[in-house]
Image (tube, rainbow, N blue to C red):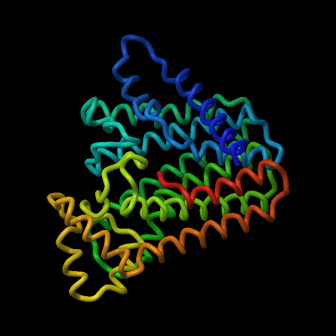
Amino acid sequence: MEMELKDIEDVARRVDSLVQEILSGSDEFRKLYDSSMHLFKAGGKRVRPYILVKSAELLGGDKENAIRLATAVELLHTFTLIHDDIMDMSDTRRGVPSVHKVFGVPMAIIAGDLLFGTVFEVAASTKIDPHDIKEITFELATATRRICEGQFLDMTLQGKLEPDDKMYYEMIEKKTAALFETSAAIGGMIAKCRENELRLLRDFGRNLGIAFQITDDILGVLGDPEETGKPSGDDIRFGKFTVIIAHFCKNASEEELQRFARSFNKPEAQEDELIAASELLVKTGSIRAAEDLARSYTERAVSALKKLPENAARTDLEFLAFHMVKRRA
């Protein structure tokens, strides 16, 4: 287990080193590049780059090209985080003030835009077959569109207290799972995988992405701010609609719904009110149901992996999948 975690850290170091090189910039634009680097310096799990690199290794792809394209994926992910924090009015990310809190909203917007443009610069300059570059660039662009659609749905669902979870799954498949799926798919493309292998990698990435987001939603209710880097209870305070909320609406009594509504989507909610609301989600079994769902989607992800060649890279991805649903941050 320690060796596998060390391997994740090795991929993260290589990606971060390349990001630092790419975003060095000139003194004339120092503030712009400093703002674009802010979240990278704060750390992060680098899960998506790891998925890409290991998916490439699984099928015999070149690791150096995988590292470069994994960097493009992390640039894309960080662009979305910067803009998400502006839209969500989030003050912190990864335990530090959000980019817009440090540098202001206009600078945060352009920092995100810079990262988005750099994604395609990095991808286009990767030394692989031009046809593969075209396919990979299209994959990245499509993922971006899906992420934007997912963010739109997230905004639309904010504040809703209803039992229908159909829109939730559509939202997380786009907003979160899309980039997990794209990471796995690009890894396969680097290795020039067969169509059935690409489909299995997509299945793995998509299901792991869904499990990842459900786990994130659980941490948004019960996570320790010292570990998650985000204030406790914010998902309740700002009315984040999740599968936890949908389950609660199906199973809570009318009196419990009324009590919960006093804190849900109420930015002025006090800490004791948020704790009471969290306890209601536990009492109704909504947290437990979400944990079961996260495990189920993880098992689906691993099931897809097991149809691919058995080797060290596959083992690493299986370990990652099970680690993701047990994480505390």
Residue 77, position as x, y percentages in the image: 49, 44
Apparent side of residue 253 relative to residue 4 in the rendered image (left or right) = left
Between 276 and 26, the one nearer to me in the picture:
276
- Picture quarter containing residue 251? bottom left
Q: Residue at x 56, y 61 (%)?
A: 325
Instruction: Check the image and name the residue furthest to the bottom.
Output: 253
Between 169 and 128, the one nearer to me in the picture:
169
- Picture quarter containing residue 218? bottom left
Residue 258, position as x, y percentages in the image: 19, 81
Count the labels in the image.
0
- Judge whether 287 appears above or below 223 on screen: below
Q: Residue at x 53, y 52 (%)?
A: 143
Residue 72, position as x, y percentages in the image: 57, 37
Between 105 and 238, the one nearer to me in the picture:
238
Q: Residue at x 80, y 65 (%)?
A: 307
Between 211 and 29, the one nearer to me in the picture:
211
Residue 222, position as x, y percentages in the image: 38, 62
Instruction: Check the image and name the residue furthest to the top.
Output: 27
- Judge whether 31 appears above or below 124 on screen: above
